């Protein structure tokens, strides 16, 4: 339900008419071309729409009320949807064209028909037609004022506001709202701010107190093998998400990321297109290249003009010396059962305060868990409803020693009814960790509230947060085979 094009035309008796305003939506036009295929008729230029439209409305020659191309009895009338026979190169019949005439003012638009052009669908089935008429009626009320009279200077001033109005009510050709019928131009809330032009991607303007929320989230991945022959792997990647409610067409906001004095420089930085300027040295650090110790280590300033919706300001990677949790997993077969030994150690650099922390031990290509004889030094052990998974709930804290252990045996009953994995056969098995640590990042990266700069007349309210979350965090059985990756972990 979109609009391909819109025109505002003024017409005086005995004159050819003047296009006072026109708007086309290229993305909607591409959809129209794709839907119509070989029967596609393009929206003409302003000069090519005037004569066919005025002819169809009977305004070209008032002394000749009959036109065979318009009034022939063999041609069915489909009011309010007009069919314009275009002239010149390309030609064709453009349908449906909606038009509202009030005095010397003509408002017209071409709605998108999301159906095959032949046979023509019935008008009541086209929601875009009713939406287009509602849009034209609202714009008519906005342009003509509450009294419904057309005034030269008032019309010119309202036409100057029309681009801002359309960004609000019809962003990118999709009607979302219409100006209220009967409202005057002074009652409308749409107004240009200074000399700035509102971009098409910004569908609304915020009014009121400025509010900025900045969230920094780091994800850590790990592949640990517990073997001298296999190198453990881990990596950290982060993203900064912003939600900015700031007055102005193109407000200026600056967010600064800081690192501790001994922090590793951020690498592989990617930024949102709304970032207006950036130090070139920020973008040159790459995790693929060998570090020479001269990489830019901050602070990282990101000036930008924010979109109205939440967006990812930037993303990055970071090299940290150790993973947050080191683990060892041993699985052995003994007398028809499996002997399980697990130890986990929280690194001293990580705050011992989790929102949640769990270790999942899946058992593939086996029957259901039968006898489970396990002991844990901390937390509690649960068996999943399907009896194919052990869940070790560690809670919100490790003990003071920062080490926890699990040990015991498990046996299986029944036929092969559990999950199947072609990789995890025999003793090839893993533990997967799930955890979240609030107010922490492994890289040490942070966003200080006082470093967020907003150029606004009102005092802004600023909130910041950060977190560390596990992603693909695996600890493989050291006594079995395991997939081994060389180099950097791949996304």
Image: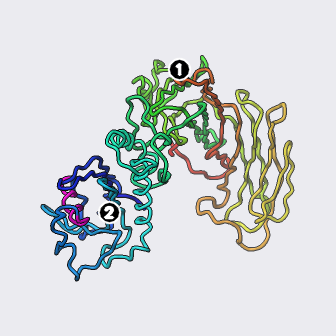
Residue beneath the point at 81% across and 37% down: 397
Residue carrying label 1: 299
Q: Which element carries disc 2, helix, strand or loop?
A: helix
Front-lying residue, 366 or 359: 359
For the question of whether residue 478 can be seen, the reply is: yes
Residue beneath the point at 51% across and 46% down: 491
Where 241 sits versus 126, above or below?
Answer: above
> In the shown orientation, is residue 413 left or right of residue 118?
right
Please state the extent of the stretch shown in magenta in the rendering.
47-58
Where the N terminus falls, by quadrant?
bottom left
- Specify the label residue 32 is tagged with: 2
Residue beneath the point at 62% across and 38% down: 228
Q: CA distance from mark 1 to mark 2?
A: 48 Å
Cβ–Cβ below 8 Å for labels 1 and 2? no
Q: Earlier in the sequence, mark 1 or mark 2?
A: 2
Local packing at callout 2 (Cα closer than 10 Å; few below 14, some 14-19, many 20+) is many
Front-lying residue, 44 or 344: 44
Q: Which numbered disc, 1 or 2, marks the residue closer to the eye?
A: 2
Residue 203 image position (x, y, % from top left): 46, 44
Local packing at callout 1 (Cα closer than 10 Å; few below 14, some 14-19, many 20+) is some
Residue at the bottom extreme, as displayed: 74
Residue 40 image position (x, y, % from top left): 25, 66
Q: Quadrant of residue 383?
A: bottom right
Front-lying residue, 349 or 404: 349
């Amino acid at each position: 339900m979109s609009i391909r094009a819109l025109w505002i035309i003024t017409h005086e008796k005995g004159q050819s008419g003047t296009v006072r305003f026109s708007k086309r939506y290229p993305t909607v036009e591409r959809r129209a071309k794709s839907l119509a295929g070989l029967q596609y008729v393009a929206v003409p230029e302003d000069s090519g729409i005037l004569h066919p439209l005025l002819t169809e409305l009977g305004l070209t020659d008032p002394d000749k009320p009959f036109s065979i191309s318009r009034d022939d009895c063999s041609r069915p009338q489909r009011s309010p949807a007009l069919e314009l026979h275009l002239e010149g190169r390309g030609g064709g019949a453009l349908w449906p064209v909606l038009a509202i005439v009030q005095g010397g003012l003509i408002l017209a638009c071409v709605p998108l028909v999301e159906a095959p052009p032949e046979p023509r669908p019935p008008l009541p089935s086209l929601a875009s037609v009713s939406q287009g008429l509602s849009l034209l009626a609202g714009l008519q009320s906005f342009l003509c004022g509450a009294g419904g009279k057309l005034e030269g200077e008032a019309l010119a001033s309202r036409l100057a506001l029309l681009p801002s109005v359309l960004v609000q009510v019809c962003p990118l050709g999709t009607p979302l709202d219409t100006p209220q019928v009967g409202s005057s131009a002074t009652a409308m809330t749409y107004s240009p701010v200074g000399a700035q032009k509102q971009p098409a991607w910004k569908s609304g303007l915020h009014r009121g107190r400025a509010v900025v929320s900045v969230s920094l989230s780091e994800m850590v991945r790990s592949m640990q093998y517990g073997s001298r022959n296999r190198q453990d792997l881990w990596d950290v990647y982060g993203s900064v998400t912003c939600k900015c409610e700031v007055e102005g067409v193109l407000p200026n906001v600056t967010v600064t990321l800081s690192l501790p004095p001994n922090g590793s420089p951020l690498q592989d930085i990617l930024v949102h297109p709304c970032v207006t300027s950036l130090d070139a040295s920020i973008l040159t650090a790459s995790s693929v290249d060998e570090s020479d110790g001269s990489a830019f280590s901050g602070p990282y300033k990101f000036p930008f003009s924010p979109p109205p919706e939440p967006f990812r300001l930037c993303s990055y990677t970071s090299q940290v010396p150790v993973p947050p949790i080191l683990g060892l997993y041993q699985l052995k077969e003994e007398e028809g059962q499996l002997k399980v030994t697990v130890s986990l150690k929280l690194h001293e650099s990580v705050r011992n305060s989790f929102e949640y922390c769990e270790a999942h031990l899946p058992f593939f290509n086996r029957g259901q868990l039968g006898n489970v004889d396990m002991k844990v030094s901390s937390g509690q052990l649960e068996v999943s409803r399907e009896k194919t998974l052990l869940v070790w709930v560690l809670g919100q804290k490790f003990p003071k020693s920062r080490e926890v252990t699990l040990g015991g045996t498990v046996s299986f009953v029944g036929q092969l009814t559990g999950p199947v994995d072609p990789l995890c056969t025999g003793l090839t098995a893993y533990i997967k960790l799930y955890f979240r640590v609030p107010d922490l990042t492994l890289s040490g990266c942070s966003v200080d509230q006082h470093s967020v700069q907003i150029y606004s007349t009102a005092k802004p309210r600023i909130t910041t947060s950060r977190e560390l979350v596990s992603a693909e965090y695996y600890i493989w059985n050291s006594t079995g085979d395991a997939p081994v990756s060389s180099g950097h972990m791949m996304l």
